[in-house]
Image (cartoon, rainbow, N blue to C red):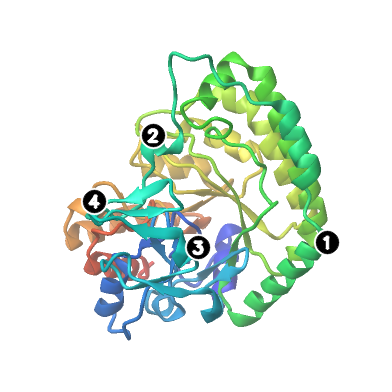
Amino acid sequence: MTRRERVMAALNFQPTDKLPKDLSGMRSTGISCFAYPKLIDALGLAPRRPRVYDTGQMLALPDTDVLDALDCDVVVVEAGMTNAFPQPEIWHDYDFNGRLPAQVQRPDAYKAQPDGTISMDGWSTMVPDGYVFNAEHAGQNIDFLADLPIPDVKAHEENLKKNGIISDEYLDELVKFLQKARASTDRAIFASLPYLNPGISIGAFGGIGVFPILCLEEPEIVASLHELSSEYAAKNAAKMGQAIAPYVDVLMATADDWGTQNSLMASPSVFRELFLPYFRRFNEAMHVSAPETKIFMHSCGAIYDIIDMIIEAKFDVLNPVQWSAGKQGYAEWKNKAKGRIAFWGGGVDSQHTLPLGSVDDVVKEIEQVMPIMKESSGYVFCNIHNILAEIQPEKVIAMYKTAGRY
């Protein structure tokens, strides 16, 4: 099998020659740019500056020789950025105040403070011993003594009328970029593209502290917002789907973190009434215009109780498969999904085993999890979430090597 064939066979619940694997197909399956140089060295590859493509989470864009060494089957494509082919013109040296010789797309976005803190675009900061950028209250300040902020539905509608549909010129440029990516690799192309997402999230209008309350107190307003967003998203799906279908294998449709460590952000009834129909509207439009492209949902946390509804909403792939959250384990998650939705992730407990366990502990857990996850196919291997800065390269190599035995 080619790498693309391997991934697509798994997502279609068909047999594969070996387990398909991913590193950084999207921004929750990646690796910290602080951990990346150590991995490069441990793999015996030539040193190089990591390309920091997610400057909030500080994630490295993996080079193809690293993907080769770990036997990974996926490349990422975003608007104007990919690791399917070299793009030296968009990367520029920046050393993060001497902490990390790296490359970024916008060096002018950063400013070093006298105490070593680095600010990005004036609103988020990375402290001298930090590994990611943070904003106060995650950039979503909440005044609990004030009235609940109510989104302006009319303004949302006017914005969508003005900016909500992709232009023919932009679509033409996007297709040319995707064509070049397809011609450059035999790996599956995982695309996160502007205009091609439902535009709804439990952390949307007002942020994660406000929007779940709005769903309870102002369901009619939420329904109106989601009706508009999904209407325009479905129009873009109809316009774009056929054009991108030959080049996009997996489409990142939403990163909608519905789970906490122990439960859901909102009740299953909220998901059913205010989210499911609108997700489904977009997904059905994409399935009509690009029937071979798989639609991907990222949703962290204890979301076991809404897996059936995620399937009903016509998603093809679910990530990060955080079976370590909530009361159910990986076997229950797999049994719930088997043959109905593919899993992408869930390879090892990223909060406990990977950071706190030994290399042997990582190997043993993967050996327990993989026979279950790969059962009946429908599975792509990677960590439950990003490989963080503190993770030793020996664990990363052991993780992929162990998965490679299946």
Query: What whole-number distance in Å separates the C-alpha atoms at marks 1 and 4?
Result: 48 Å
Q: Amino acid at mark 4?
A: Thr
Q: Is residue 64 above or below residue 277?
A: below
Q: Position of residue 208 (x, y in %)?
A: 48, 31
Name which residue lies at 35% across and 30% down.
262
Q: Are marks 1 and 4 in contact (CB under 8 Å)?
A: no
- Point out the tag, 2 or 3, that comes first from the N-terminus: 3
In this view of the protein, can residue 164 be seen by the observer?
no
Q: Secondary structure at mark 3?
A: loop
Asked whether the residues under the numbered discs 2 and 3 touch, taking CB atoms below 8 Å apart as contact, a structural biologist would say no
Which residue is under mark 1?
Answer: 168
Q: Gap between marks 3 and 4, in whole Å?
A: 22 Å
Graded by Cα atoms within 10 Å as few (under 14), some (14 to 19) or many (20 or more), the crowding at tag 4 reads: some
Could you tell me residue 114's position as x and y percent? 25, 56
128 relative to 64, above or below: above
Between circles 1 and 3, the one closer to the viewer is 1
**Label disc, if present, on residue 353 of the rendered structure:** 4
For marks 1 and 2, the one nearer the N-term is 2
Q: Which quadrant, please, contains the C terminus?
A: bottom left
Asked if the residue at tag 4 contacts the one at tag 2, i.e. Cβ–Cβ closer than 8 Å, the answer is no
Relative placement, left or right, of 349 versus 104 is left
Q: Helix, strand or loop at disc 4?
A: helix
Q: Marks 1 and 4: which is nearer the front?
A: 1
Residue highlighted by disc 3 = 25
Q: Secondary structure at mark 2?
A: helix
For label 2, the residue is 137
* Front residue (pair 14, 385): 385
Image: 166 above or below 399: above
Distance of label 1 from label 2 (alpha carbons): 39 Å
Q: What residue is rendered at 77% in x and 63% in y?
A: 171
